[in-house]
Image: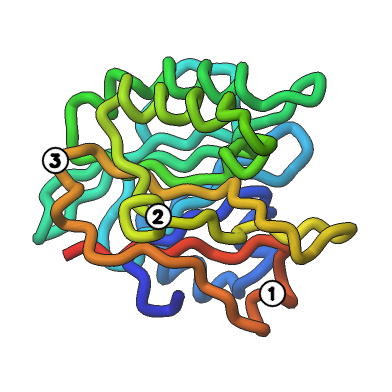
Amino acid sequence: MEQADLVFFQECFHPLTYVTTKILQDLTNHYLWQPTRNGWGNCILAKHANISEVAIEHDFKGRLLVSTATFPAFGELAIINLHTPITDGYSRHNLKKMFQVISGIIREGNAIICGDLNFGECFDKKGQTEHKQILDGILQENGIIDCYRKFNEHIGQTFRPVRKPDSKICIDYIFVSKNLESRVNVCHILEEEKIMEMSDHNPLVAVME
C-alpha cells in the first residue's frame, strides 16, 4: 500500500482525520477528496503525480469522483473512483446511472475505474446469473476489463460483513480500458491483519507497468 502510485478510498472522512496538517500540505495537488452530505466521501491519492478533478454534473456527490493525472509510463490517465449507493435494497440502478455519466470519458481510453460497487456476481444464487449478466453488460458497453477476473478464476473476498465475516463477497473492483489491459501484470486481494483492523474491506491491488 505504501508503495502504491494510486490509492482509492471510499466512505472516508477528510484526510486530516487520518494525517497531520504537515503531511497533507506535502501532498498538495496529489490528492482529491469530495464529501457527501453526511461528511464522508471519496478520496484519490496520486503519490507521484499532480491530480486534477474533472467537473461533471451528476447526482452522486461524494460517491463519483472523476479526475486526471499524467504518468511518464502511461501519459494522461482518466482516474475514476466510485461508491455506488443502495436505493430500496438495490444498487444496480445507480450503478448503471453512474456508468452513463462516465461512459464518454471511459471510451476515450486510458481510463482506470476503481471502487465499491455494492454489486457483484457473488450475489447470484446457484443457477442464476443476473448480477453477472448486468456486470458483463457494463464491461462490454464501456470497453473495460475487470482486472481481478483477468487473473483469478474464482470470486475472492473484498468485504467482510460483521454478521458473516467468512462470506465470499466481492463488491470492490479495478477496471481499466481495453487499451491498458496488456499493461496490467497482476491483480489480487490484500489480506493483512493490520489493514483488517481498520476496515471491513480487504484492499484490491493491481500492478501496471
Specify the color scheme.
rainbow
Taking 25 as reference, is 86 above or below it?
above
117 or 167, which is in the foreground? 167
In the image, what residue type sits under mark 1? Met
Q: Residues within 10 Å of mark 1 (few under 14, many from 20)?
A: some
Q: Residues within 10 Å of mark 2 (few under 14, many from 20)?
A: many
Q: Of the numbered discs in the image, which one, if any, rests on residue 196?
A: 1
Separation (CA) of disc 2 from disc 1: 20 Å
Query: Mark 3 = which residue?
Result: 179
182 or 6, which is in the foreground? 182
The local secondary structure at tag 3 comes to: helix
Q: Of the numbered discs in the image, which one, if any, rests on residue 167?
A: none
Query: Mark 2 = which residue?
Result: 148
The local secondary structure at tag 2 comes to: helix
Separation (CA) of disc 3 from disc 2: 17 Å
Quick one: which residue is furthest to the front in this view?
A: 127
Task: Give the mark toward the camera: 3 or 2.
Answer: 2
The picture places residue 76, in percent across and down from the top left corner, at 16, 44
Query: Which callout, 3 or 1, points at the residue further toward the start of the chain?
Result: 3
Could you say which quadrant of the image residue 16 lies in? bottom right
Could you say which quadrant of the image residue 126 lies in? top right
